[in-house]
Amino acid sequence: MRAPPRHLLSYASFFALLVLDAVALVSILLVQAFDAPLPIAWLVAGLLTAVAAPVLLRVSDKVFAMARSEPTIPNAGGSFL
């Protein structure tokens, strides 16, 4: 289940950070393990992360669902009263 409309900016920024972290991690692993040139490592890491994007979307959904179920985390745009 996707985030409600008032959470779209935080959801999109969290997903973008997750994708960038995955690209950086895979590229570092490729350079360290296979001694690949840096541009090739970034290209392969980007392709592998694009393939893994549906999994990353499900991870983002689960993180936001856990935040919604926790009563001590306020909703964005909600009232504290």
Image (cartoon, rainbow, N blue to C red):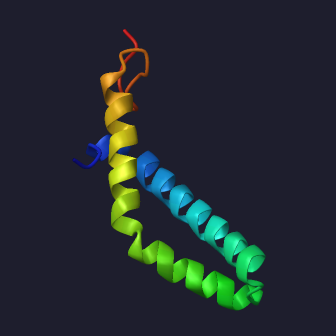
Determine the residue positioned at 41% across, 22% down: 74
Determine the residue positioned at 49% across, 77% down: 48
Q: Nearer the viewer, residue 36 or 20?
A: 36
Tell me the quarter of the picture where residue 32 sits.
bottom right
Q: Residue furthest left?
A: 1
Tell me the quarter of the picture where residue 37 sits.
bottom right
Regarding residue 77, the answer to whether it shows in the image is: no
Tell me the quarter of the picture where residue 75 sits.
top left
| Vertical relation: 40 (above or below) 66 | below
- In the displayed structure, does residue 76 sit left or right of residue 34? left
- In the displayed structure, does residue 32 sit left or right of residue 44? right
Q: Nearer the viewer, residue 13 or 58?
A: 58
Place of residue 43 in the rendered image (x, y in percent of width and height, measured from the top left): 60, 87
- In the displayed structure, does residue 6 sit left or right of residue 35? left
Name the quadrant of the C terminus. Answer: top left
Q: Nearer the viewer, residue 78 or 65?
A: 65
Determine the residue positioned at 36% across, 15% down: 71
| Vertical relation: 18 (above or below) 52 | above
Regarding residue 27, the answer to whether it shows in the image is: yes
Determine the residue positioned at 39% across, 50% down: 59
Place of residue 24 in the rendered image (x, y in percent of width and height, measured from the top left): 66, 68
Place of residue 7 in the rendered image (x, y in percent of width and height, measured from the top left): 36, 43
Q: Residue furthest front?
A: 33
Number of numbered discs overlaid on the protein picture: 0
| Vertical relation: 31 (above or below) 57 | below
Place of residue 51 in the rendered image (x, y in percent of width and height, measured from the top left): 40, 76
